[in-house]
Image (cartoon, grey):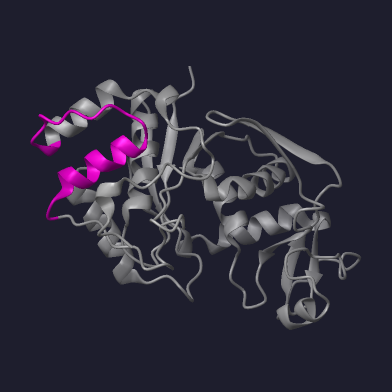
Amino acid sequence: MTLTIGRFAPSPTGPLHPGSLVAALGSFLSARSRNGRWLVRMEDVDTSRCRAEHASTILHQLEQLGFVWDGPIIWQSRRQQAYLAAIEQLHNQVYVCTCTRKLLEAQGNTEHYPGICRERSLAKNGHYSLRVKVPNAEICMTDRLLGRQCLDLASHGGDFVIRRADGIFAYQLAVVVDDAASGVTEVVRGADLLDSTFRQRHLQTLLGYPSPEYLHLPLVVDQRGQKLSKQQKAEPIDIRQPLPALQLALARLGQPVNPDIDSLAGFWAWAQASWDETKIPRNPQTCGKPASDSGQD
């Protein structure tokens, strides 16, 4: 029987907020319900946005909330050679792109890359981005919560960047390489990353990596229906009162909440014993915002 390995992979651009806590809790309980391992990875590959102090804050928050992870923290910023090796392996499927954002905007191509540089090859040096070719066909996968999902990458964004012109490796590539290196067998994360899954599945196929199972959780939104995010200045988790935050996150995942629990140890014992994946709300966009949360942005 294959050992289940799950992971939580926050970007250290700010502290954990209620939305990211739902993702952390869902991924943790899914892995532990299968007697599996749960890893923490800092997705700090984008050094222009990520900060060491935010990473320290996130790890402290997780500890104070009672999360326990297996093995050392994985830092994307320390894995540049692995990403370079993956690009070398992709070779014929990757090409140099000298198109600037300004050029694409002038042509009205802000959401879809039209393949301007597609006939170029891979070069070793230079200030340019690298794109990977996508097939002109649907890529399909079965999400454990949402069922069968398909997307035609050629008509939804086109060839995508795996290394930026400033030399920073793109999220899509780094995630795929790191999940494979860690032996991740399941990815439990927010539904806002569903489209990214198809790009990652494409890279997994090109690199010969196995594809993990996927479960995309409904998003937590504010009273305006907008996803809670660091960019929207979502309020961080108050670790002085961890139990209410955990109980609310559990409720948002559709799980039963025991109001008589008054300790972290009691919460974790209850949450793991009562975890039922079939009760997670199946709306791919949102798991709602309780009326009692009026104090949150």
The picture places residue 284, in percent across and down from the top left corner, at 54, 40
The picture places residue 9, in percent across and down from the top left corner, at 43, 51
Residue 67 appears anywhere in the view: no
Residue positioned 63% across, 34% down in the render: 210
The picture places residue 270, in percent across and down from the top left corner, at 20, 26
Magenta span of residues: 240-264
Residue positioned 42% across, 41% down in the render: 287
Tell me the quadrant of the picture where the C terminus can be found. bottom left
The picture places residue 175, in percent across and down from the top left corner, at 55, 51
Q: Is residue 249 magenta?
A: yes
Left/right placement of residue 133 relative to residue 249 reads right
Left/right placement of residue 66 relative to residue 286 reads left
Q: 33 above or below 150?
A: above
Furthest-right residue in this view? 119
Q: Nearer the viewer, residue 170 or 77?
A: 170
Quarter of the image for residue 265 reads top left
Residue 174 appears anywhere in the view: yes
